[in-house]
Amino acid sequence: MLIPKHLEEISEIIETSENNEVLKIKCKCSHTHFIVYEFCESDNANVKPGFNEIIRENDKLYLVKRNFFGKIVEKIECGNMFEKKQRRIIKVKCEKCGLEYVLFDNYKHGYDAVITQQESCASKNEITFYFKKAYSQPIEVFIKIYQDISYDQFKDEFENIDYSSYLNSFGNIDIYGLNPKLRKIKICSEETA
Ligand SMILES: [Zn+2]
């Protein structure tokens, strides 16, 4: 079984095979309908209006704002914001009891997060995550986890890796919902390696 640690307590296995696992999310109160929220870095209003061009100066990238005559009037250093992965977090809130669970945070879960320590590129500043609803109504939520490397192969490649890190370093994740009409709602699909 390949259930990542953070999902263990809220997962019911629907399908299982050697390389993947389909989980149905179930609240600790045993309810199975959730409001799904998403935070996606590219949606975030970090970039102020009017900044629409990127320039390179002395090997640094800047977002710039030009005036009517094309002269640069303001610039913001981008640092390595274009080299790192855009952060994405999916969380759900139980329709019945209101408990919330993070299902996926690409800085904490998945191969890149675990192996290349993606979290170390996260901003040191306090970030407020503005979540928006991924779907308007409460839905049932399913997660498909893919892992094509065995724990033995993992241990050969990375010494000192424990089993829970292995479980957290899946290579691919699909999150989807089923609405009351049993229509499939795609929420997130990410390759994490
Ligand atoms: Zn609940």
Image: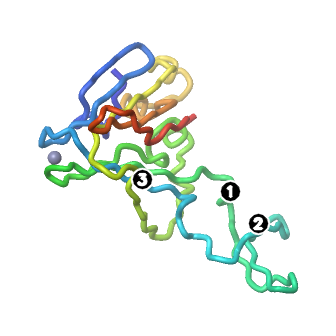
Front residue of 11 and 186: 186
Comes first in the chain, label 1 or label 2 = 2
Q: Residue at x 41, y 37 (%)?
A: 175
Q: Which mark is residue 61?
A: 2
Q: Position of residue 91 (x, y in %)?
A: 35, 50
Whether residues under marks 1 and 2 lie with C-beta atoms below 8 angstroms apart, the answer is yes
- Please give left or right for residue 54 compared with residue 127 in the image: right
Residue, disc 1? 82
Dot 3 beta carbon under 8 Å from ligand 1:
no
Kindly identify the residue that appears in the image at 48 percent across and 37 percent down: 110
Q: Amino acid at mark 1?
A: Phe
Mark 1 and mark 3: Cα distance apart in space = 21 Å
**Picture quadrant of residue 81:** bottom right
Residue denoted by label 3: 38
Disc 2 residue type (three-letter): Leu
Measure how far apart labels 1 and 2 are at the Cα level.
9 Å
- Residue extending furthest top? 18
